Amino acid sequence: MDKNLIVAIVLGILVVVSAIQAVQLSSLKAKLSSGTLSTSGAKVSSSLGGSSGGAASVPSNLQNLPSMVGGC
């Protein structure tokens, strides 16, 4: 087969894959904005909206993280 034909086929496959991902991303964005996205047991929280100021709470397993990785 011609090298240009192989490159064209691979490029076509990449374009199709990126189009599929764009459709999936837009549907995910629509689900997130409408609030219909369900999580399977995972707790999802946002620290951007509705906070009354102050510091965000850190989960207990992350409080001693700097000492675990040799940080300051």
Image (spheres, rainbow, N blue to C red):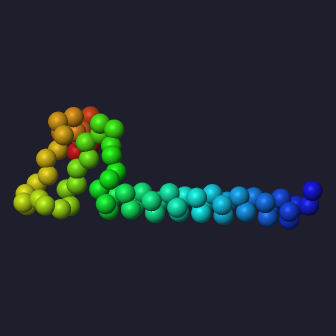
* 15 and 36: which is toward the camera: 36
Residue 35 position, x and y percent, is 29, 56
Q: Residue at x 34, y 51 (%)?
A: 37
Answer whether residue 49 is visible to the viewer in this image: yes
Question: In this orientation, does residue 64 appear?
Answer: no
Q: Is residue 36 left or right of residue 58?
A: right
Give the quarter of the image for residue 70: top left
The residue located at (83%, 59%) in the rendering is 6
Q: Residue visible at 26% across and 34% down? A: 68
Name the quadrant of the N terminus. bottom right
Q: Position of residue 39 (x, y in %)?
A: 33, 43
Q: Which quadrant holds residue 16?
A: bottom right
Q: Residue at x 86, y 65 (%)?
A: 4
Q: Position of residue 54 (x, y in %)?
A: 7, 57
Residue 20 located left or right of residue 68 = right
Residue 32, given in percent of the width and then of the height, sits at 34, 58
Between 72 and 66, the one lying in front of the other is 66
